[in-house]
Amino acid sequence: MPYESIKHHQQSPITAREIEVLALLAIGLNNEQIAEKLGISEKTIDNLLASIKLKTRLTNRVLLAFYSYGKGYVSEAAIKSAMRAHREEKKP
């Protein structure tokens, strides 16, 4: 990707769709689950995450989850609820 394109990407705001992806990532969903929830392909999720990483200069899902929480894209209550649901799924 040419330098100017990268520079432009880093200065672009996070889109509403990217915020949706970040919020779902922050509650622990994988790309397949996010794609299913949003009704889009996994490849689109990959592309959105690549765009988000360029814009935020963050390199992994953990950092993106913290970023999402810090920006208020996902609430503490939503994270706790997702954790409870995940625990319930694991029960026999």
Image (cartoon, rainbow, N blue to C red):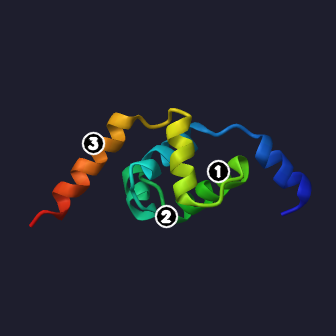
Q: In this image, 11 relative to 16: left or right?
A: right
Q: Which residue is mark 1?
A: 52
Q: Which residue is mark 3?
A: 81
Q: How far apart are labels 1 and 3 at the CA level?
A: 25 Å
Disc 3 crowd, CA 10 A, few/some/many (<14, 14-19, 20+): few
**Considering the numbered disc 1 on the image, is that residue within a helix, a strand or a loop?**
helix
Q: Earlier in the sequence, mark 2 or mark 1?
A: 2
Q: How far apart are labels 2 and 1 at the CA level?
A: 15 Å
Q: Residue at x 49, y 64 (%)?
A: 42
**Considering the numbered disc 3 on the image, is that residue within a helix, a strand or a loop?**
helix
Of the 4 image quadrants, the one containing the C terminus is bottom left
Disc 2 crowd, CA 10 A, few/some/many (<14, 14-19, 20+): some
Q: Which numbered marker is on residue 73? A: none
Q: In this image, 70 relative to 83: left or right?
A: right
Q: Which residue is mark 2?
A: 42
Q: Are marks 2 and 3 in contact (CB under 8 Å)?
A: no
Question: Residue 26: x percent and y percent?
Answer: 45, 49
Q: Amino acid at mark 2?
A: Glu
Q: Earlier in the sequence, mark 2 or mark 3?
A: 2
In the current view of this chain or complex, which residue is farthest to the left? 92
